[in-house]
Image (cartoon, coloured by chain):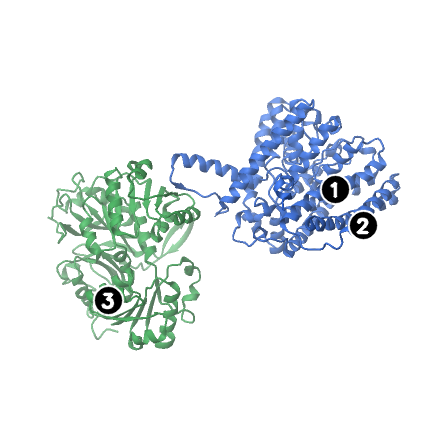
Chain colours: A blue, B green
């Protein structure tokens, strides 16, 4: 079991690092004296201590990680870090149950943005900082996930349509080059976050709010420091900035990286997903605006367009901010923007759902099957960006699509079995598995997940992890074959 | 002329065959001794076995005092390398290379004197593809040739009862198409050439060669047969080099189905074509053709490497209802056997592509050579030099020129003296537009005219060329 031990060693190191990040809210808390100073020292001490003990026990098991270890590590990180992330919340809010705290922390680290807390405006600055900071850290984790782990499953990164590039798909070990790539992506992520913060300040937000919302936007999370979410500011410039950066974060970081390094916009032009990403959004915003107009919910075309555009982008990219209670829309409109979130974000972005590239492959596979039934002899590979997609990847994507549907159905059934109504149960599962945040009805934009009972909350936690780890990563670790020698 | 040909494949063999008959000293180099033996049996030439890119082999082939090197092996690398050696070691004056890869066009500097030293490059596959594309655009034609950068076209059409001019004398063409200048350059009746006169009556089944400005070709063809409806659906059998290039060229404008037997090749094709439907199967499989709606096909092209297969596939397609069928046939003997029967068009790739090469080989001022009727006839584009005193052409009316029987001047292309303003993309541009003059008995030839001469037989070509040479005191 030396594999497990060396994974635990890396986990221990990550815990030590994670305890370090708690220093930031601690310092902020002391600096602004927001009354939550005591919440962090205990949390830091426990995290540091656990990390140290784990490290002392496993420090002799240093070896390079194999593919299998990679899966295990990723799953453990996303299970264990939320546990420690709950500590400051539990310390400051004694009334909060562990289930709710774990939900909040998972929602933060998976960049989902579903919350069980209310009275956000009254929370201390450092607690809100901690919540949104979890989004930002989660976003970094998601980017690494996209670079390092998902390609191994044949469903993640650029390797999908560049089979000729000797990518991680063919390597047995997590190579140092991957670390280099991840660092490059993080730099872009950091620069975009700074740009987003500055833009938000420029658009009229206060500095702290701007920083925290920038964390949320770049991680495509959705925690806000206000109960009314971004609607609190009721400002068109702020909404524009949020939409712009949410779109940027919904594009593959690999594309940003190549554009940044090559000093050219060419990578954007070559990105296979980008035209579908922007095209689908543009068409659906326009269509939904025209659909909503006759209902007279908002005053005229431009007002309708403002709210439709914001919520479409916010929910489709899996950000999950709201500026108004869109529960007032006809149910079709609400379902539609929720549905967009299940496939629109590009692979390699911080968004959720099955990702645009898989949606394209699934669509092309359907077209191919129709063609094949008319022309039994046809040879028609599925092509992305002009080059054929290998058959095993198509199968992986088909299996992914299937298991995604099955997950939604199963979890929805469990939700309804435990007493939730269909719309609440279904939308909560979809919003969580897509890491979007707000659902419909009882878990809609104007309310929050506190209404769910403990069992339902755990289902949602599971859904968030499932979606964020792109289902297979979690299923691989849960499968008996994984643990067999 | 002493010519060294590298490569004894289909292209090399047909080049050799064409040049041997024109009084040249030919040496053919190839690694395959069987190919060479076969060639030596048929033709009067020398052969050398060995690697064409080796200086010693080239020396053995007589490159030291050769006038021209024609590198037409299968491999681009060998051809390029041989040209460089020919330049550096033997200083051969003219070096022609066959280049199959299309990307060399993007880097012309690679072919200049300092690099691979290729004077002219040819790509037979591309020329065959171009010819096929023209046939799709003019579905009535048997062959379409272009002169003067595509402004004049010479088409071969089979006359059919029902065409307005069929059964009428040629001079009626002017009455049928007033204001439109066209000329019938030659007529073949049961494979025998007839010199066209005003009184000649066109019969059903005649193969007629007409020349006209490119924009008028369709109307001229309509005179000779009921016009075909435009091609929409194309089926290609065989996804080899030519099949692939052709599919690429037409897939955007037509509904294209491509049948390829080999599974891996079919997958490769499907990966590299964007609109064409690639089918894996046998083009001689009746069931496959039936299930792919062969009866709706406007054009069926059999383009595999195998003559017999192409013939069978084309025959089968015709019987199953394809409107027009074409077979690619390498063996010259088969071509005449097949064309004009059930198969509408038989094309010999070697003969199609030989014209470009011949243009470079011929002495004198030959601007363009087109091989017609599988090499039996030729259409030449020659430049008239000199003046009335030094030339037997310039300054004379066409009826005054003593052309041998069977050779006819079909048209002239005259350089414009002044520029004309034309509109390109809405912007006025000054251009020297060459004038196309369809030849009549009283047309006078001026210096530097490009003259298009049709020779019903290849034997006439040297006589015509001699006629165009200027006297000694010129220069």
Left or right placement of residue A366 versus residue B420 in this view = right
Q: Are marks 3 and 1 in contact (CB under 8 Å)?
A: no
Q: Report which quarter residue B229 is drawn in.
A: top left
Q: Which residue is mark 3?
A: B37
User: Residue A249: x percent and y percent?
Assistant: 65, 43
Q: Nearer the viewer, residue B81 or B113?
A: B81
Q: Chain letter for mark 3, please.
A: B
Alpha carbon separation for disc pair 3 and 1 = 79 Å
Q: Secondary structure at mark 2?
A: helix
Labels 1 and 2: the sequence-earlier one = 2
Q: Is residue B463 visible?
A: yes
Query: Please, what secondary structure does the residue beneath circle 3 have?
Result: helix
Relative depth, front residue between B6 and B2? B6
Q: Is residue B254 left or right of residue A62?
A: left
- CB atoms at circles 2 and 3 under 8 Å apart? no
Question: What is the C-alpha distance between the residues marked 2 and 3?
Answer: 84 Å
Percent across and percent down for residue B217 are: 26, 47
Residue A204 visible in image = no
The vertical placement of A39 against A336, above or below, is below
Disc 1 versus disc 2: distance between alpha carbons? Answer: 15 Å
Marking on residue A52: 2
Mark 1: few/some/many CA within 10 Å (<14, 14-19, 20+): few
**Residue under label 1:** A80
* B41 up-or-down from A61: above or below: below
- Toward the viewer: A64 or B80? A64
For mark 1, give the secondary structure.
Answer: helix
* Quadrant the C terminus of chain B occupies: bottom left
Q: Chain of mark 1?
A: A
Q: Do callouts 3 and 1 point to residues on the same chain?
A: no
């Amino acid at each position: 079991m030396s594999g497990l031990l060396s994974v635990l060693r890396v986990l221990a190191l990550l815990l030590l690092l994670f305890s370090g990040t708690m220093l930031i809210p601690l310092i902020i808390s002391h600096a602004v004296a927001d009354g939550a100073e005591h919440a962090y020292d205990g949390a830091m001490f426990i995290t540091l201590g656990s990390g140290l003990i784990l490290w002392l026990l496993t420090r002799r098991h240093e070896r390079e990680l194999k593919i299998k270890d990679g899966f295990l590590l990723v799953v453990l990180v996303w299970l264990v870090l939320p546990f420690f992330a709950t500590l400051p919340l539990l310390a400051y809010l004694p009334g909060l149950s562990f289930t709710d705290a774990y939900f909040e922390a998972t929602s933060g680290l998976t960049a989902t943005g579903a919350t069980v807390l209310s009275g956000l405006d009254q929370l201390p600055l450092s607690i809100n900082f901690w919540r949104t900071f979890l989004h930002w850290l989660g976003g970094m984790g998601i980017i690494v996930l996209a670079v390092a782990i998902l390609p191994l499953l044949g469903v993640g990164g650029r390797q999908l349509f560049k089979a000729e590039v000797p990518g991680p798909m063919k390597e047995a070990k997590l190579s140092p080059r991957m670390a280099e790539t991840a660092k490059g992506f993080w730099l872009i992520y950091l620069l975009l976050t700074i740009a987003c913060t500055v833009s938000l300040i420029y658009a009229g937000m206060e500095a702290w709010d701007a920083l925290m919302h920038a964390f949320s936007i770049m991680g495509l999370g959705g925690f806000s420091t206000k109960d009314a979410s971004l609607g609190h500011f009721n400002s068109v410039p702020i909404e524009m900035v949020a939409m712009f950066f949410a779109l940027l974060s919904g594009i593959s970081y690999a594309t940003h990286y190549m554009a940044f390094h090559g000093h050219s916009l060419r990578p954007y032009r070559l990105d296979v997903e980008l035209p579908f990403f922007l095209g689908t959004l543009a068409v659906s915003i326009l269509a939904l605006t025209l659909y909503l107009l006759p209902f007279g919910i908002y005053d005229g075309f431009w007002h309708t367009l403002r709210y439709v555009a914001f919520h479409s982008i916010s929910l489709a990219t899996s950000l999950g901010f709201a500026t108004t209670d869109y529960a007032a829309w006809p149910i079709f409109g609400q379902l539609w923007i929720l549905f967009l979130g299940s496939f629109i974000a590009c692979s390699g972005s911080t968004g959720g759902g099955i990702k645009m590239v898989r949606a394209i492959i699934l669509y092309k596979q359907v077209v191919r099957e129709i063609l094949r039934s008319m022309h039994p002899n046809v040879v028609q590979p599925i092509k992305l960006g002009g080059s054929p997609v290998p058959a095993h990847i198509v199968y992986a994507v088909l299996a992914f699509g299937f298991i995604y549907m099955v997950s939604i159905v199963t979890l929805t059934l469990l939700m309804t079995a435990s007493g939730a109504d269909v719309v609440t149960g279904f939308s909560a599962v979809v919003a969580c598995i897509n890491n979007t945040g707000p659902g419909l009805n009882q878990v809609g934009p104007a309310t929050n997940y506190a209404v769910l009972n403990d069992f339902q909350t755990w289902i949602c936690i599971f859904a968030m992890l499932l979606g964020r780890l792109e289902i297979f990563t979690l299923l691989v670790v849960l499968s008996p074959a994984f643990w067999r020698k | 002329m002493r010519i060294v040909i590298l490569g004894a494949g289909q292209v090399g063999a047909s080049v050799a065959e064409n040049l041997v008959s024109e009084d040249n000293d030919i040496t053919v180099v190839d690694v395959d001794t069987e190919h060479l033996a076969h060639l030596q049996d048929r033709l009067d030439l020398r052969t050398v076995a060995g690697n064409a890119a080796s200086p010693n082999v080239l020396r053995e082939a007589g490159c030291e005092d050769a006038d021209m090197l024609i590198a037409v092996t299968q491999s681009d690398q060998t051809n390029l390398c041989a040209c460089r050696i020919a330049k550096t070691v033997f200083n051969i004056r003219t070096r022609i290379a066959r280049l199959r890869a299309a990307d060399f066009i993007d880097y012309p500097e690679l072919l200049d004197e300092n690099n691979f030293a290729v004077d002219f490059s040819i790509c037979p596959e591309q020329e065959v593809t171009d010819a096929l594309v023209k046939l799709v655009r003019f579905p009535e034609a048997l062959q379409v040739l272009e002169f003067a950068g595509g402004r004049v076209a010479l088409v071969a059409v089979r006359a059919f009862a029902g065409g307005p001019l069929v059964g009428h004398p040629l001079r009626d063409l002017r009455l049928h198409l007033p204001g439109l200048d066209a000329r019938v350059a030659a007529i073949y009746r049961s494979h025998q050439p007839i010199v066209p006169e005003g009184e000649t009556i066109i019969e059903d089944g005649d193969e007629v060669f007409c020349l006209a400005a490119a924009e008028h070709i369709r109307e001229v063809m309509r005179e000779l047969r009921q016009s075909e409806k435009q091609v929409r659906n194309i089926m290609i059998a065989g996804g080899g080099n030519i099949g692939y290039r052709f599919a690429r060229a037409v897939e955007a404008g037509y509904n294209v189905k491509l049948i390829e037997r080999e599974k891996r090749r079919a997958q490769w094709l499907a990966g590299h074509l964007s609109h064409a439907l690639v089918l894996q199967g046998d083009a001689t499989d009746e069931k496959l053709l039936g299930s792919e709606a062969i009866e709706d096909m406007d054009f069926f092209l059999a383009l595999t490497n195998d003559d017999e297969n192409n013939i069978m596939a084309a025959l089968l397609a015709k019987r199953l209802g394809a409107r027009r069928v074409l077979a690619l046939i390498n063996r010259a003997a088969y071509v005449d056997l097949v064309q004009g029967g059930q198969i509408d068009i038989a094309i010999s790739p070697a003969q199609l592509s030989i014209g470009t090469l011949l243009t470079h080989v011929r002495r004198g001022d030959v601007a363009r050579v087109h091989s017609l009727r599988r090499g039996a006839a030729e259409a030449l584009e020659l430049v008239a030099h000199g003046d009335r005193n030094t030339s037997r052409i310039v300054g004379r009316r066409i009826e005054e020129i003593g052309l041998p029987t069977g050779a006819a001047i079909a048209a002239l292309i005259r350089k414009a003296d002044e520029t004309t303003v034309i509109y390109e993309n809405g912007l006025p541009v000054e251009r020297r537009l060459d004038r196309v003059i369809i030849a009549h008995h009283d047309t006078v030839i001026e210096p530097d005219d490009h003259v298009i001469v049709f020779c019903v037989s290849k034997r006439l070509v040297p006589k015509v060329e001699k006629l165009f040479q200027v006297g000694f005191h010129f220069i």
